[in-house]
Amino acid sequence: MLGIVGTVPEEKFPLIFSSVNLKENNYLEVNKKEILIERGTPALIASACKVLEFFKKESPQAYLVGDTGKGEGSRKLYSFLTEDLPKRSFKVLTFHYLLPEVDSCSKIIFTLEELPFKPFLIADAGFMYAVKMTGYARFFDLFTPDPGELAFLADEKAPHPFYTRGFLLQEENQVEKLIERAYYYNNIPKYLLVKGKKDYIVVDGKIKEVVEEPFVEVLEAIGGTGDTLTGIVSALILCGFEPVEACFLASKTNRLSGHLANPTPATSVKEIIPYIPQALEILLANFRKTNLTF
C-alpha cells in the first residue's frame, strides 16, 4: 500500500486519514470531501492515483490536514502520525508539504524505526527539509528536490532553508557539484531524483541517468509539475519497479505527459495529469520493442 502525507492549502480542512479517489472532473475525493487539484500534495496524490489506476493497484491512503503556512495543521498531523503509523503496514510512504519542525520530525522517525517493517521512505518539500535538519537523511530512501532545494541539502551549516548560503544558491546550474557536496555531508539518502530542466537520478553520489527529453519549455512555468513527478515515482516503486528504474520511468512519464497535453503558460497541472496513463503506455511499449529493461 502507498501512503502519502501532506497538507491542503485550506485552513479549515480537517485532519483526515483515508483512501483517495480521483474523480473525472479534476478533483480528489477524500472521506467524502472534495479537494481541487492545483499543485502541492493534491497534485502529487492525483498523479499517483493515475499510475496506480494504470497498473490496476489500489488507491493510495492519505494523511491530510489543512495548513496555509501557519503550522497549526502540520503540528496536529505530526502528532497523529506518531499514534497512527504503528497501526499501518505501508510498502511505500511519501512525505510532502509539512511545516519543517525538527522535534516533530524526529518523533516521526523514531516511530518509523520501531515498525516491524520499514516502508520505502520518500521525502519532498517541507518534510524533506525537516529530515535533513534532524540529521536522519540516510534513514530515508529517496529525496526528490529541485536545484534550489538541493542547495539547502548541500549546505552542511544551514540549520534552515532560509539560511542557505548564497554561494550555494548561485550554483543552481551546477547541480553535479551540489549533489557531490550533499552526499559528502550525508544529507541525502541512498537515492536522489533532482528535478529540473534536466532530471538527475543518483545512487550513493553517483549519477546513473540524466533525463532531458522530451523538453517542454513552457512546463517550467507551470506550478505542480515537480509534485506530479514525486507522485509518479512513489506509485511506480509501489508497483514493484526498482528505485532507479522508477525514477527514470517517472521522469520520462512526467515529461511526456506534459508534451502530450500541448500546454501553454495558462495550462494548469490538473490538465496534464490525465495524460499520465497515455505516456506510460507509450513508454512501456517502446521499451518492450527495443528489448530494454529498467
Image (cartoon, rainbow, N blue to C red):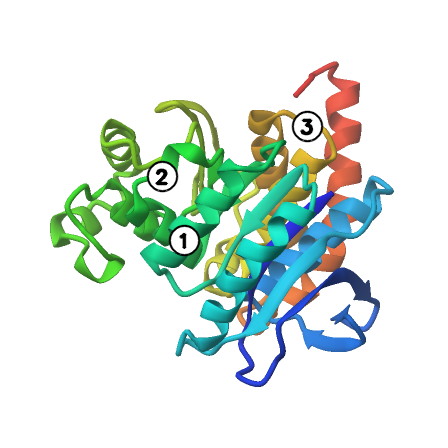
Q: Amino acid at mark 1?
A: Cys
- On the picture, is 151 further left or further right than 34? left
Residue furthest top as drawn:
291
Other residues around mark 3 within 10 Å, as few (<14) / some (14–19) / many (≥20): some
Q: Nearer the viewer, residue 191 or 24?
A: 191
**The quadrant where residue 32 appears:** bottom right
Asked if one can make out residue 261 in the rendered structure from this viewpoint, the answer is no
Q: Amino acid at mark 2?
A: Tyr
* Cα gap from disc 2 to disc 1, whole angstroms: 10 Å
Mark 2, secondary structure of its residue: loop
Reading the image, the residue beneath label 2 is 136
Q: Nearer the viewer, residue 218 or 93?
A: 93
Residue 75: assigned label: none
**The quadrant where residue 249 appears:** top right
Q: Amino acid at mark 3?
A: Phe
Residue 16 place in picture, x, y as percent: 67, 69
Q: Is residue 49 above or below residue 27?
A: above
Q: Nearer the viewer, mark 1 or mark 3?
A: 1
Residue 159 place in picture, x, y as percent: 20, 53
Q: Is residue 264 above or below residue 171?
A: below
Other residues around mark 2 within 10 Å, as few (<14) / some (14–19) / many (≥20): some
Reading the image, the residue beneath label 1 is 105
Other residues around mark 1 within 10 Å, as few (<14) / some (14–19) / many (≥20): many
* Cα gap from disc 3 to disc 2, whole angstroms: 25 Å
* Cα gap from disc 1 to disc 3, whole angstroms: 28 Å
Mark 1, secondary structure of its residue: helix
For the point 27% across and 35% down, the residue is 182
Reading the image, the residue beneath label 3 is 241
Q: Is residue 62 above or below residue 185?
A: below
Is there a contact, CB below 8 Å, between mark 2 and mark 1?
yes
Is there a contact, CB below 8 Å, between mark 1 and mark 3?
no
Please state, as top left, top right, bottom left or bottom right, where the N terminus lies in the image. Answer: top right
